[in-house]
Amino acid sequence: MSKDSSTSAAEQPQRRPTLADVAHLAGVSLGSASRALSVPDQVRPATLDAVNRAVAELGYIRDGAARALASRRTHTIAAVYPTLTNPIFAHSTHSMQQTLWALGYQLLIVSHEYHKDDEAALIRATLERGIDGIIMVGTDHEQEVYSLLRHRNLPYVLTWSVDESDYPYCVGISNFDAAYRLAQRVLAHGHQRIAICSGASAHNERARGRRDGILAAAAEKGVNVPEQWLLERPFSFDGGRDAIRQLWQGSPRPTVVMFGTDLQAMGALDECRRLGIAVPGQVSIIGFDGIEEASMMQPSITSVCIPAHEIGKHAARIMVSLVEGEPVEPVGALQETIVERESLGPAPA
């Protein structure tokens, strides 16, 4: 046989190790090997150690498709985020992934980058991959999204907000209440000329809650926010920069600008530096989210710290309980923290 038509032994594809190979090498029964991999807390430590060593030596990887067919579960949870560019979501994702992993599940992350019209199609494609449950950001979603989940009888958890929903499995803060309390702090510094820059409020109850909370606190003090000072800009550095440029072209000018995210506030602070606008001497800059980077700015940015780690942890635990049919205790609204820093000063005369 010619060299071209033959294949050397070294080139032969290696046989994939099986669970039976693991059991044989570990010196345990097939059932014990299976239990060690599926429910390790229910086998003896010596058996678990032997199986783990055999798995490592053989390079054994369980057949996920076969496992899913047998259990009717993929042990995969999807999380849909509006963006992956905001660091605040990374904190939540980390806690969510760690909690799910400890409970025997993996996390699949997808993002629609605030293109809410694409959310239903994105979720449909995610469902087709095979997942056991889904975690979504916010309470405002298209009816098509909820119809998809109901049709598949798929459990879901809503995060970051408890506003505008009576769904029992919401894990987050009241954005309205947090913004209301933040605005009270701003008003206590004597500010009467308040501008608000949120993200797009359509299909985003978080943006609406933060805007409306500020407006409610201002109205209680008899402070009116002019229509031209109610801006909607992307949740990005450029969104904040653009807001400052627009506000500074008019007269009179606000003494404080309250942003929907720290990213916007950081971009606004950078634009103020470029234009020679003193912060907080001429205008105070307020953020929302509490990302660590905001505390490193000069001046450091006053913000609302969202308990992102707790949101991720609670959402993961509730999700697994729903998947496994265990009783679930609703968490209720989590508590934000207002952190006053150098970017908030007294209203200039």
Image: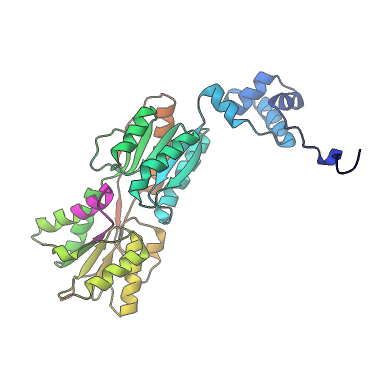
Q: Position of residue 175 (x, y in %)?
A: 26, 49
Q: Quadrant of residue 299?
A: bottom left
> Which residue is farthest right?
1
Q: Determine whether 186 is above or below 329 in the image.
A: below
**Residue 300 shown left or right of residue 42 in the figure:** left
**Residue 42 magenta:** no
Which quadrant is home to the N terminus? top right
Q: Determine whether 44 is above or below 143 in the image.
A: above
**Residue found 23% across the figure and 41% down from its top:** 164
Residue closer to the observer: 271 or 246: 246
**Residue 206 magenta:** yes
Residue closer to the observer: 94 or 6: 6
Q: Position of residue 119 (x, y in %)?
A: 37, 44
Range shown magenta: 197-212
Q: Quadrant of residue 148?
A: top left
Q: Position of residue 273 (x, y in %)?
A: 34, 76
Q: Answer yes or no: is residue 96 visible.
A: yes
Which quadrant is home to the C terminus? bottom left
Q: Quadrant of residue 166?
A: top left
**Residue found 66% across the figure and 21% down from its top:** 32
